[in-house]
Image (tube, rainbow, N blue to C red):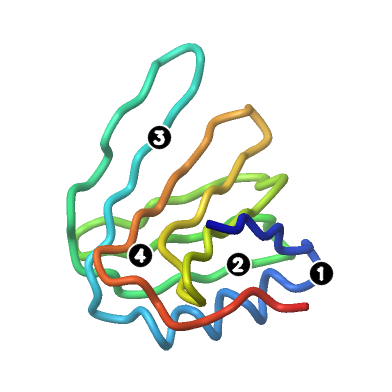
Amino acid sequence: MTVAKIDKSEWQSYFDRVSKELEGKSVEIDVEALSLGSQVEQEWIPLLGLTYEPRDDILSVMVEGLNHLIRAPRTVFVDIELGQVSSMEVVDGEDYRHILKLSDPLRLTAPH
């Protein structure tokens, strides 16, 4: 498995592209932090979209019935296995790790 870091300058275009490919696929959202441990926010729910708004510095993970907001994201990593994205990890300004696990890996590579 390869872990690729997505540069902040590429977030908006990357998430727009990924969002189109992932729409309707199932995702699990986990949140981890020292203060709360590891918690599953949503289990295998249809993904409606991913968007990064640079002006507000917010990454929105839109799933059925919920808009999971990640404020002031600092880093974005994607796990790539055999040319497919299997999960994403976003670390926010408070050191919370938001992990998006994909039920069906996406045949998409990180930008170069």
Secondary structure under tag 2 reads: strand
Q: Earlier in the sequence, mark 3 or mark 2?
A: 3
Rendering quarter of residue 16: bottom right
Q: Is residue 63 above or below residue 108?
A: above
- Locate residue 112, reporting x and y percent: 78, 78
Circle 4 residues within 10 Å: few <14, some 14–19, many ≥20: some
Residue type, label 2: Tyr
Q: Where does label 2 land, which residue?
A: 52
Secondary structure under tag 4 reads: strand
Instruction: Classify residue 95 as left or right of residue 88.
Output: right
Instruction: Name the residue at 40% across, 35% down.
Output: 31
Q: Earlier in the sequence, mark 1 or mark 2?
A: 1
Residue type, label 4: Met
Q: Where does label 1 land, which residue?
A: 9
The front one of 20 and 53 is 20
Instruction: Name the residue at 32% across, 62% down.
Output: 102
Q: Where does label 3 land, which residue?
A: 31
Q: Is residue 59 above or below residue 32?
A: below
Judged by depth in the image, the label closer to the viewer, 3 or 4, is 3
- Locate residue 76, reporting x and y percent: 64, 54
Q: Earlier in the sequence, mark 4 or mark 2?
A: 2
Secondary structure under tag 3 reads: strand
Instruction: Classify residue 103 as left or right of residue 15.
Output: left
